[in-house]
Image (spheres, coloured by chain):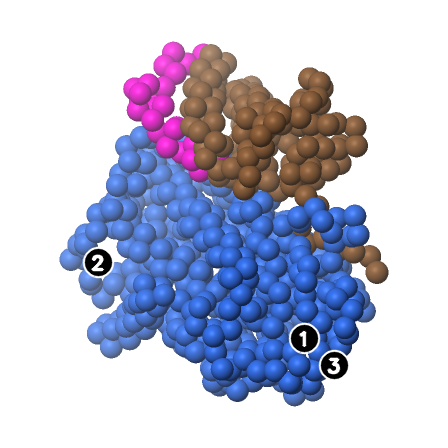
Amino acid sequence: MGARTAAPAGGALHYAEAALPGAAIGLVAGSFGAVTAVLAGLGAGLTGAIAVGMGAPLALLGGVYGVLVGRGVIAPGAIGPTALFWVVGFPAARLAEEAFVAAAVGHGAVLREPLPWFLLFQAMLSLGFAIGFLWLHERLAPRWFRRIASHSPVAAGLAAHYGPPPGRTRRS
Amino acid sequence: MDSPDVESGRPAKRDEPVSTDPEAARKASVPRQRRPPAQEQTSGAPADPAPAAAPAEAPDERVWHAGRLEPMPIRKLPKAPPSIHILGPTVFLVALGVGMGESYMWPRLVLVFGPEIRWLFLIGVTLQAVVMLEMARYAMATGESIFFGAARVFKPLMWFFFITAIAVYIWPGHLSAGASAFERVTGIPWQATAVAGMLLVGVVFTLAKVVYNLLENVLSICIGLLVVGTAVVAAMVGSFADLSSTVTGMFAFGYLPQEALSPAWFPIIVGSIAFAGPSGMQQMWYTLHLRDKGAGMGAHIPQVRGLRHAGEQEEMPSRGFMFDTSDSGEMGKWKGWRRWVAFDALLLFWGITMLVTISFTVLAQASARLDPGVTEVIRDGERDAALDAMAGAFSAAGSPVLGTVFFLFIALIGLNATLGLFDSFSRGQADMTYHFVPGAKRFSVSKLYAFFLWGLILFGIGVLLFGPADGPAAILDVLAFLSTFAMGAYCVVLLLVNNLTLPKPIRPGIVSNALIAFAAVFYLGALFYSLFAFGVVVS
């Protein structure tokens, strides 16, 4: 796939719009446990702590990913840069979540194992997260970019990169 | 083309355009569904066939003879898209393949024999990735399914698969795992969920304009959520020790404890290797999904429409097409398609199957650490009890949410498999019926697809309500035998089809052939060894 060589012109609002798919995926991934916490009958406090602690950092990082794609720093759909991004971002998000939940429920200890092992474990799992994230982003983001391309030069550039929808049918 | 089998002078058939106008010929040779709107024709759509210079079919057109069936006309090969931008048909293999093997059978073997046993999983999934590449070779080169390819070699081979598919896949027992997990979370009886799910699948597929597009979108979202979700949950409950032992265990080549060779465990281990990734006929159906995606020469074949849109179904050609392998430009495009499918096979299929299994193994190890009693329950082999125990271990450790999440993952896996299986079965049977049952061509493919889909659904509902969901007890062993035998058989068919019916420049190399031959020997050898040495069918 061809990397884009120049960042398209656009204001902060346009980049924020381009960041939305990544942020939404991060939010859904992060709050995966919280949605079912309700089904499991957990208290509202713990459910909220899990949702915010994991959802907020992953949503933020997912949005940053979208901005980097919009600015041409990360080539759309490229697995290598995405994996690199999440090998740093995912452990950081997990660390933030552990600290937030521990503070919210009043636990003294934050981590179950030494910090280096914790970070290494999260970094290894980040590859799986990165592929799943990219898979969803490649499925959802092009539709969004095409939709807002008319008023956003950032989205228009990305939409042009993806081209028309694959397998599109035409009304007879 | 390098072969004297390429001929000219064959009169054009009724579904072939006869025109000397290049533009008219191009439009007529590409199904309307796949033609982009006028303003998009030059924008490089990934799945656009882009046959800019498709030759007009004239009386002197060239054809490729493959077997005794109708020869394939020569057409332009479309340009391959960049890799990940088409998250294509692999999603079906992942949806079908990531099932009980990955979420239950292998975590169970790890708890019983230790993580070192996972080297066998590595072998099993890698073999399946090679099979996937070879299935894709025929489908992308011809736009035909592997069933059609089998018929080109020897028609009874195709009928064997037609009958096996009905015998093995008509029973709705595969719905029970996902629906039972859903029952644990919601309390809704699993039979009710299964019946409602089947009816929903039938209605949705019937209303869909193009079945493939709808299903690919739904499955892609489901698989994406599964991968992201399992990674997040494994990150929350697992530890570095769990993950490192799981990963290093994949490279403990040769590790095989004595107990693994016992009559109780050998058939289970062999079955787990065979069912690592897609099992049974799932790889064969992949060729039909490749075609509907428009991969390679599949771009020249119309997509299957839902029954509601059957009136718009374009006529299916009576055979596939071949590209000019003597043209260096065409061969360049072919290499692009091979790169595309290799990316699909290695990163998406192999990688995602591995990742999901690793995540579930980490979950199983974490549950055993939280509650050592889980190991005993899992060892006993009662699937539902083992899944209950794993979920219970997470709940007991103060995280009831994780027990629920675990069941939701199992339900999601069941949903993916059901969607994929119903579509795949109907697609495969419709394809074989349309091309090889006399008189079937008067029905459109979409009507035949709907016939098999609703036949499967109605039979399934009847069996769920009144009969044994897995099939009659008396033939369960026969069904298990057929499922594994079909895998050995399709390896043999692959060898024959790819080496006998394709032009030399695009035939598989010696390494691919050797690996497929090894897979055939492995599947069939293990099946018969287990049968004769222990009197047990692999399970």
Q: Earlier in the sequence, mark 3 or mark 2?
A: 3
Residue at x-position 29% and y-position 71%: B521
Chain of residue at mark 2: B
Residue at x-position 26% and y-position 38%: B245
- Estimate the x, y position of residue A109 in percent, counting from the top left: 36, 14
Q: Is residue B254 above or below residue B473?
A: above
Q: Which numbered circle lies on residue B317?
A: 1
C-alpha distance separating marks 3 and 2: 59 Å
Q: Is residue B477 above or below residue B408?
A: below
Q: Which numbered circle lies on residue B14?
A: 3
Of residue B187 and residue B84, the one placed in the foreground of this image is B84
Which region shows up in magenta? A106-130
Residue position marked by numbered label 2 in the rendering? B260
Discs 1 and 3 lie in a common subunit: yes
Which chain comes out brown in the rendered image?
A: A
Q: Nearer the viewer, mark 2 or mark 1?
A: 1
Of residue B296 and residue B202, the one placed in the foreground of this image is B296
Residue at x-position 81% and y-position 69%: B311
- Left or right side of B244 for B345: right
Chain of residue at mark 3: B
Colour that chain B carries in the picture: blue
The amino acid type found where label 1 is placed reads: Pro
